[in-house]
Amino acid sequence: MKRLATLFVKCTGVLLLMFILIGPHSVMAKQGANTWWVPGDFSTIQKAIESDDVKDGDTLRVGPGIFEGAEVTKGVHIVGVGKTVIDSGPAGPLDLEYGFWLQEGSDGASISHITFAVGFGVYGKPDYDVTVDGKPANDVTVDHCRFINNFQAITNWGGSNWYIHHNTIVNVITVGDEGGIGGTPILIAGQEGAAVVRDNVVAHNSVTGEVLFDPDDDGSEGNIWAIGMAYVGAEAISGNLVTHNRVNLVSNRPDLRKVVAFVLADFTASSSPCDVIHDNVITKNDFRGPSIQFEVSPTDLWNCNLIYKNR
């Protein structure tokens, strides 16, 4: 009881601090000194990012129209104008493509008002390999974007201070690779070699639709996670907030894969899981759509993270 009371006080403090930060969070990113147009100043987003004239903090206004995504290596603000759609991009794993692949140097980037129709929408990680050398992207904002039929819509490996808010995610696909792999619409994960993954806020997002199964998917890799927080390395995952999200993603093949609204998991089988995943707050979410609301593994993590007032 004493531990639980202490945890409640700590987590409530974290929660209040995060709510204070939510308002000015996007302002905390570096403000752009110059605004560039794609098309107009540059024919593609990639050419804009690679230009010596485009600096950290600059704004790229894109569209309307259909565009190719890019490898993001600068802290730029990418804003869709009208109906801006990314339907292709850099090659990724599983024969899928990235929309925006945030790599080292992209700290402070923001992405807003864009529709993504690719395998990986916004993907923050130096490389797909979990054990890669390289710094993760920090201080990233993804807001008011729409993600359609993605494998992973928004992915943050090892980054801190991401603000993922007011995005709409419709459907998730699986890939029939070596028996099948299920996608995860929103994922925050601890990358091996990274520091503490902290102060990420996932708020006011909607995950709806259905699981679109690959014909070769045999369901061997388990359930689909709508929102996941997973430890696969890093010093710790601590002080993150997941709140006011709505999950109504369903599986038409529950015999193959069910949908879990939220997953909190330690994949390293740590002897003391509460040392690596602790003081995260998951509250006031509507998780009533999927057949399973929570998957917490190991169950010890219920005792060192605050999960309450969810529906």
Image: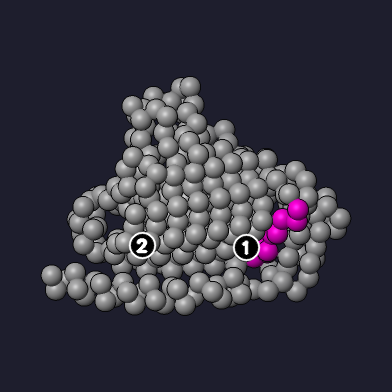
User: Tag 1's secondary structure?
Assistant: strand
- Residue 77 inside the magenta-drawn segment: yes
The kind of residue on which mark 2 rests is Thr
Lower position in the chain sequence, tag 2 or tag 1: 1
- Toward the viewer: 7 or 76? 7
Horizontal side of residue 299 vs 91, given as left or right = left
The mark closer to the camera, 2 or 1, is: 2
The kind of secondary structure the magenta stretch mainly shows is loop
On the image, the x and y values in percent for residue 278 come to: 29, 64
| Secondary element type, mark 2 | strand
Q: Is residue 61 above or below residue 288?
A: below
The magenta segment is: 73-82
Residue 283's mark? 2
- Say if the magenta span includes residue 184: no
Q: CA distance from mark 2 to mark 1?
A: 25 Å
Q: Quadrant of the N terminus?
A: bottom left
Mark 2 residue crowding within 10 angstroms, few (<14) / some (14–19) / many (20+): some
- Locate residue 51: give its quadrant: bottom right
* Residue highlighted by disc 1: 110
- Residue at 49 percent across and 26 percent down: it is 214
Compared with residue 21, is residue 217 higher up or lower down, i.e. above or below? Answer: above
Q: Residue furthest left?
A: 1
Q: Is residue 206 visible?
A: yes
